[in-house]
Image (cartoon, grey):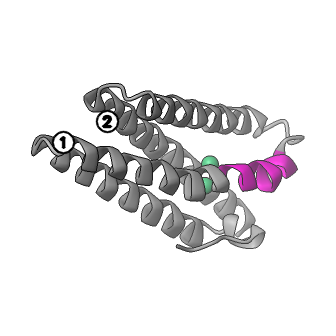
Amino acid sequence: MIILDEPSRRKLDVHHKFHHETESKGEEITMKAKNLLAKNLHEDARQVLFLLCDHWKMTTLEHAKEEENGWYQELADDEEVWPMMLGFRRDHYLLERFMTDLEAKLIEGESLVEVIMYADGFLKLLHYHNELEEKFLAQMEEETC
Ligand SMILES: [Fe+2]
Ligand SMILES: [Fe+2]
């Protein structure tokens, strides 16, 4: 797993690599849980879904906190970009909500089919968020060239 320092978070290529690697790993774990569930291996699928929660919490949700305390914060006073920053923060909030609900459902022993729907939702939302963030970073790089 790569950890990004503040200057790297502002560089599109390094930031993209982080997004891509964490998304791919999350997708792989989600797929593993689906395959186990398809084979009726419920307990194994449940354990893999707990691993998925750990993965997202240690990578994406940590990354989101670092962004909010770093470059998002610094751009918050820029009138031209603050609506975008607000949108990014909203995405982070929704990702956090997805994770809270997903984990609660797992702990309460709810249907794994439903839990996987939340895992898919998390992945989709994260993908759109990363896409927009990278587009924004690309524009920033263009403007500073
Ligand atoms: Fe983000
Ligand atoms: Fe990011």
Q: Earlier in the sequence, mark 2 or mark 1?
A: 1
The x, y position of residue 36, in whole percent, is 18, 49
| Residue span colored magenta | 64-75
Q: Are marks 2 and 1 in contact (CB under 8 Å)?
A: yes
Mark 2 residue type: Ile
Disc 2 to disc 1, C-alpha distance: 10 Å
The x, y position of residue 81, in whole percent, is 75, 40
Q: Is residue 134 left or right of residue 120?
A: right
Q: Is residue 17 left or right of residue 133?
A: left
Label the magenta part by its dominant secondary structure.
Answer: helix
Identified at 49% across, 69% down, the residue is 17
Mark 1 residue type: Leu
Dot 1 corresponds to which residue? Answer: 37
The quadrant holding residue 120 is top left
The x, y position of residue 52, in whole percent, is 42, 51
Q: Is residue 74 left or right of residue 121?
A: right
Identified at 18% across, 42% down, the residue is 37
